[in-house]
Image: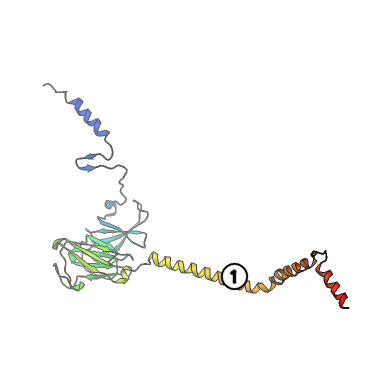
Amino acid sequence: MATDLSSVPLFFFFFFILLHLPSNYVLGGLILEDGYTVTTIIDGHKLEINPHAVLSRPQSSDLILLDSSHSTIYTISFPISQESVVKRLSGDGVAGLSDGEPGSARFNKPRSFAVDNKGNIYVADRLNGTIRKITNSGVSTIAGGYSKGFGREDGPAQNATFSSDFEVAFVAEECALLISDHGNQLVRRLPLKPDDCATASHSALGAVSFWVLGLGLVMSCLIGIAIGFVIRPHIVPYTGRLQSLSLQRDMEALPNQSGETSTDVLLRHQKRNC
């Protein structure tokens, strides 16, 4: 059986072309851009963790990692690498619904969470139909909980209901959570308390710095004026008066047009009067 070798050179030609394509060459609708590298920093197999979502935590050096399969939330220390320390933050690996101490609280397959400016964590506790809040002091339920089951009811947060598939996102500009209620095809809004969003603004710090600088300048000026009043009596006799008296004597010693000085004229008038 004869082998057709006519296609071999053509194959090597196209292979050569593919090897020398530019890094941003458009291939089948894709723009391939070079210069990026992917590395593994957390191996869930070794840690028996199934990472589902990860976010940074403001005012902290930790990342927050959600293990939806085990209904558990972890923290990961910086710098992030395979040697990073992973600690359990909340949940005990058993699905359930209970608030209280972070380590003993239970969730039921959450798949989304958000973090506010103060580092508080809001968990979309999917199969419990609730939104939970994790702080340093403990875990509480801020939406859902009174009504068992799923639904699409608005109103007071404890009476609200959600579908079995929803996520949350924190919007700092509105100090609120936005809820992507996929199962109900809705976007819901949950305003937070002002304390949850309160942070020290850079503008406020800048204003304080400005006033401190201004006050320092004013105090410096006042101190300078006070020092000037204290030392002025000691400066004037030895500067201004001596200079004026010396100038007066020099003027008296100067001769007039007749060759006489002011002292000679004064002596001559005294002799006449005598």
Could you say where residue 159 lies in the image, as x and y percent from the top left?
Answer: 18, 73
Q: Secondary structure at mark 1?
A: helix
What residue is pinned by disc 1?
224
Q: How many discs appear?
A: 1
Could you say where residue 153 lies in the image, as x and y percent from the top left?
Answer: 15, 70
Is residue 90 rendered to the left or right of residue 187? right
Q: Residue furthest bottom?
A: 274
Query: In the picture, which quadrant includes the N terminus?
Result: top left
Q: Quadrant of residue 186?
A: bottom left
> Are there few (<14), some (14-19), or many (20+) residues within 10 Å of tag 1?
few
Query: In the picture, which quadrant includes the C terminus?
Result: bottom right
**Model colouring:** rainbow
Could you say where residue 161 lies in the image, as x and y percent from the top left?
Answer: 16, 69
Which residue appears at 73% of the width and 67% of the height?
243
Of the pair 210 and 71, the residue shown nearer to us: 210
Classify 8 as above or below 93: above
The reply to whether residue 92 is in sight is: no
Classify 29 as above or below 258: above
Q: Quadrant of residue 229?
A: bottom right
* Disc 1 residue type (three-letter): Gly
Q: Quadrant of residue 95?
A: bottom left
Is residue 256 rendered to the left or right of residue 179? right
Of the pair 28 and 169, the residue shown nearer to us: 28
Is residue 122 rendered to the left or right of residue 1? right
Of the pair 241 and 210, the residue shown nearer to us: 241
The reply to whether residue 143 is in sight is: yes
Which residue appears at 24% of the width and 34% of the height?
18
Which residue appears at 53% of the width and 70% of the height?
218
Which residue appears at 30% of the width and 71% of the height?
194
Could you say where residue 30 lies in the image, as x and y percent from the top left?
Answer: 22, 43
Q: Residue furthest left?
A: 1
Is residue 173 rendered to the left or right of residue 248? left
